[in-house]
Image (spheres, rainbow, N blue to C red):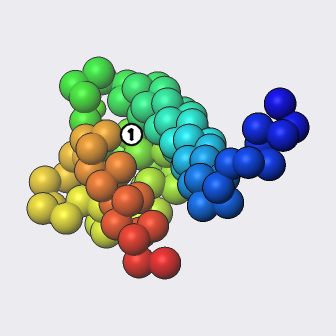
Amino acid sequence: MFRLILSLPLGLLLLASAVEIRAEDDTRQQRILDELQQRFTQADTNHDGLLSREEAETGMPRVYKRYDAIDTDKKGALSLEDITDYLAQQRGKR
Ligand SMILES: [Ca+2]
């Protein structure tokens, strides 16, 4: 087994570890997304699938603070997608 690892081209090894890191990243991201979904559902007290400003203030204060920035089309209600889009956009800026 050890000999097999040694005989693997270095490039392949690097690629394998890169893929592994990538997979860990995806898992982490999925966990964040799951948690976000859960918090969104809890915060959406009238269950219309949208977060009003009032619902955000009570249930997701961090979203509330950035409400205007997230609510790009100014409809006064945020979908989970609005929030994830915003987060993705923020991540892209860094
Ligand atoms: Ca709602």
Q: Residue at x 77, y 42 (%)?
A: 5
Q: Which residue is mark 1?
A: 55
- Quadrant of the rendering where the N terminus is positioned: top right
In the rendered image, residue 88, in percent from the top left (x then y), is placed at 37, 59
In the rendered image, residue 75, in percent from the top left (x then y), is placed at 13, 54
Using the rendered view, name the quadrant where residue 55 is placed: top left
Among all residues in the image, which is located at the extreme top?
47
Q: Residue at x 84, y 40 (%)?
A: 3
Q: Where's ligand 1: which quadrant?
A: top left
Q: Residue at x 12, y 62 (%)?
A: 73
Callout 1 amino acid: Glu
Q: Is label 1 within 8 A of ligand 1 (CB to nearest ligand atom)?
A: yes
Among all residues in the image, which is located at the extreme right?
2
Using the rendered view, name the quadrant where residue 92 is placed: bottom left
Q: Is residue 54 left or right of residue 50?
A: right
Whether residue 91 is situated above or below residue 32 in the rendered picture: below
| Secondary structure at numbered mark 1 | helix
Whether residue 28 is situated above or below residue 21 in the rendered picture: above
In the rendered image, residue 85, in percent from the top left (x then y), is placed at 30, 55
Q: Residue at x 27, y 44 (%)?
A: 81
Q: Residues within 10 Å of mark 1 (few under 14, many from 20)?
A: many
Instruction: Return the residue nearer the eye: 72 or 19.
Output: 19
